[in-house]
Image (cartoon, rainbow, N blue to C red):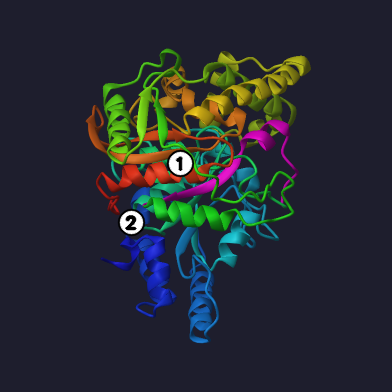
Amino acid sequence: MALWELDGVAIAAQIQDGSITAREVTEATLARMDAVNPAINAVVARDDEAALKAADAVDAARASGAELGPLAGVPITTKVNVDQKGFATTNGLRIQKDLIAEMDNPVVSNLRNAGAVIVGRTNTPAFSLRWFTRNSLHGHTKNPHNPRITPGGSSGGAASATAAGIGAMGHGTDIGGSIRYPAYACGLQGIRPTLGRVAAWNPSSADRHIGAQLMAVSGPHARSVRDVRTSLAVMSQVDLGDPWHSAVPLQGADYPRRAALCVAPEGLQTDPLVEGALRDAAARLVDAGWQVEEIDCPPFREPARLQAQLWLAEMARGAQAAFAQEDDPDANHVLAEMHQLTPVPDLNETLDALQARLGFLREWQAFLAKYPVLICPVSSEPPFPDLLDLEDFPRVIEAQLTQVGLPLMGLPGMSVFTGFGKSDMGRVPLGAQLIGGRFREDILLDAAEAIEARGEAIKVVTP
């Protein structure tokens, strides 16, 4: 295998035992980026000199006998909506092209401290708002598996890069599916952690309002579950800059190997291809010794409505001027569609949404105590035709019910790859969503590993 085809755990082990050097891996990854990134536009900023310097530091540390971090020499990417010292935190916006970070977001510093080598910054839609990745500053990101389908969003650049071999892991963020959906669309493993699991904040900007504080998280995309597990552990290191961060052990108490399967939550019209992927994932868990029961799950629809209300309340208060100044056609269209579906709430409606959140979280926690894993759709459809939200936003938002509903409760969710299928768009990746209780990412990872072990391995794709 080429060095850029290896997963992060394999790279770190081979650097540790001296089979390869971090410089060799970094040079191979940068060459891979040169070869494939023009076709997918996943990485939109890079500093090769800094990456090679970081790799040389790993090699020097190994030569001196120093203890290496768990991601020592592993090439990764970071999303352009998090601060990375010396780079613009653009969030896909022309109005932020000169917002140069003076220090790292805790996610970035934790990755660096583990020895990871940052090889590039990945694209996102304007304001990180969509499940598609195009903006007026950095351009249009494509799916390396199939340019006719979306790479997902908002972390579409991260997933596209990782799928194409530009790094073993891609950092993403998720407030409404922005880790889970790109992982699904690009045929990867990706986890949205529990609120508070991963410390994150941008020193370059003002603190976010309460809705985003309660719903937005950072997490990894990777081509193997073991890479997700390792990178999540690295990202979860303590940083006092994020008051929401909780230093909860990643390994929890023992649990019953019991899962619930819900193919069509609250009447969701789940496509037969998606249903097949869900039942396949369930069958693999049964083969691994799990008990799976098909059952209705707690609500998604009302949490999704309240989540959208909180988004719009914050946009109406603090982002309307920025939308007008940026004047990105895609972002303007999506915002207008959201306003049609969910009016901006007043103060009492906002307070009611925050109050209702507690009851929904209580209901979900009780359900997940009995069924430690819920298997449900990532989306009710196979990966969308690219830019479908500009043509039929109601169809898109309905299909993404489970993406939008989950973050209100701050629960963890994981997109696990199950294989490929054939839709109207041609060959497309498919997968299932796994949902677990607060701070029980370990259960999701265990279930995902069982599903992964009984299916086809994820291979790097050349666009």
Give x and y (percent) for residue 48. 48, 69
| Magenta span of residues | 204-223
Residue 209 shown left or right of residue 234 in the figure:
right
In the picture of the structure, the residue carrying the numbered disc 2 is 36
- The residue type indicated by label 1 comes to Leu
Q: Decide if residue 404 is in sight here.
A: no
Q: Quadrant of the N terminus?
A: bottom left
In the picture of the structure, the residue carrying the numbered disc 1 is 444
Q: Is residue 268 above or below residue 12?
A: above
The residue lying at 74 percent from left, 53 percent from top is: 241
Give x and y (percent) for residue 145. 29, 44
Q: Quadrant of residue 315?
A: top right
- The residue type indicated by label 2 comes to Val
The residue lying at 38 percent from left, 38 percent from top is: 184
Q: Secondary structure at mark 1?
A: helix
Q: Secondary structure at mark 2?
A: helix
Q: Nearer the viewer, mark 2 or mark 1?
A: 1
Using the image as rendered, state which of residue 266 and residue 348 is in the foreground. Answer: 266
Give x and y (percent) for residue 311. 64, 27
Total marks in image: 2
